[in-house]
Image (tube, rainbow, N blue to C red):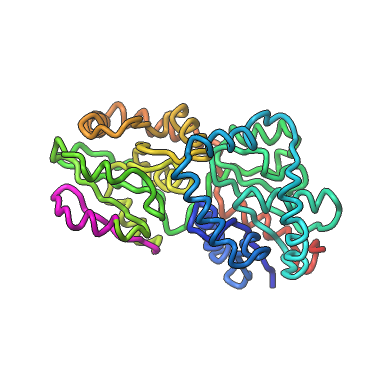
Amino acid sequence: MKKVLFLPFLQISSGHHQVANALIANIKKIDPFIQCKKVDILTYTFGNLESLISGAYLRWINLAPGLYSWLYKKSVYEQLDKNKRFFFYECLFLKSMFNLIREEQPDLVICSHSLPSYLLNRLKLNGRINVPVINAYTDFFIHHIWGISAIEYHFVPNGALKKWLMQKGVNENRIWVTGIPVHPEIERRESMFQHKKKYNVLVTGGSLGVGPMDTLLNTPFQMNRLHYYVLCGKNEKLYYRIKKLNKETVTPLPYISSRAEMNALYDKMDAVLSKPGGVTVSECLMKRLPFFIYHALPGQEELNMDYLTKAGIAFRLPEWKMKQHENRLLSFLDCPTKKEEYINAIRRCFSERIDLSSSLKMVLQSCVPGDGKM
């Protein structure tokens, strides 16, 4: 029986875990007998310290977003044409990663976070392991920490990143433009744009309910043509605050774990206001839902926002001024020409995209149980 090891990072619910879960669901549809297991290398190495570290990370990006953004771009996104070593991470995790692979003996490893990819790449370059590895990228860019040179397979969001990897020396046949993996229960929807008297707008800040939603809630709404459904994630305080406001045009929604339920919710929406997290964006693109960015976390999401807005597949709302935002939303939703331009932009960006399940099948068929582990 084949065994696939998934390596996200941290225990907090994030795009790294959502991509891993999406890939597990796709693999189980291909072969339900394949064993899939997720492991966080931080928890594996340091145990309960993971919760302290993840908590400190969340506090940092909330309290000092500018500093985090500057350090992130300086350390991992500058001079991408050069190869960088991260000796600090190697000292902390390289031995643990080797031990993990030796204990689990997987036939395939899938990295949905850059750090495990970096560590596996170092171990493979040093000849210590030879298990095949897939990089499943969760953002619309690739930075220094991702391992590349010794990684066998790359699932990339778009054709631009495929070309970039080829310039870095990766064989074209090892790169598949799959998009950021989406759970199979999020079903593709062709454009269903209609002119309406009233539109439904989904507002989300990610699974943790992160984002300046309080500003939205405390702003007097200028129009009644937009009904906001606020996905509060695991932020129960936010959910009950909205509930108490008792606004006719704002409906709070608790955390939704069911992908089928999310699929049904997307089908009721006409637009989405959100942060530019890779998975949320990919789900909305799958649904052909217009995507408006009202907030971006420092670092990754800022870079995602740059790509998405330049490509014309998302629209930035730089300041939270409700009257201006509602006017902009309605000017888009009421205009057939703008909607058609948006759909064409999505088609251009994903013209090279191939089926995710087909890519997984090819990789799984090449992985013989018992081969290439240590």
Q: Is 131 in front, or is 241?
A: 241
Q: Residue at x 41, y 55 (%)?
A: 207
Outermost residue toward the right in this view: 127
Q: Is residue 26 visible in this depiction of the protein? A: no
Q: Where is residue 141 in the image (x, y as percent from the top left)?
A: 57, 37
Q: Is residue 262 visible in this depiction of the protein? A: yes
- 240 part of magenta stretch: yes
Relative horizontal placement of residue 119, taking residue 201 as reference (left or right): right
Where on the picture, by quarter, is residue 86?
top right
Is 186 rendered above or below residue 174? Answer: below
Q: Where is residue 324 in the image (x, y as percent from the top left)?
A: 23, 29
Q: Which residue is drawn at 49% across and 35% down?
A: 66
Where on the picture, by quarter, is residue 361?
bottom right
Q: Which residue is drawn at 50% across and 58% down?
A: 12
Q: Position of residue 313 (x, y in %)?
A: 42, 33
- 261 part of magenta stretch: no
Q: Is 104 in front, or is 184?
A: 104
Is 262 rendered above or below residue 199? Answer: below
Q: Is 97 in front, or is 33?
A: 97
User: Range of the magenta residues?
Assistant: 238-257
Q: Which residue is drawn at 20% across and 49% down?
A: 250
Q: Quadrant of the C terminus?
A: bottom right
Q: How many labels does the image show?
A: 0
Outermost residue toward the front in this view: 63
Q: Position of residue 195 (x, y in %)?
A: 20, 36
Q: Quadrant of the N terminus?
A: bottom right
Relative horizontal placement of residue 100, taking residue 298 as reference (left or right): right
Relative horizontal placement of residue 161, taking residue 238 as reference (left or right): right
Is 221 rendered above or below residue 24? Answer: above
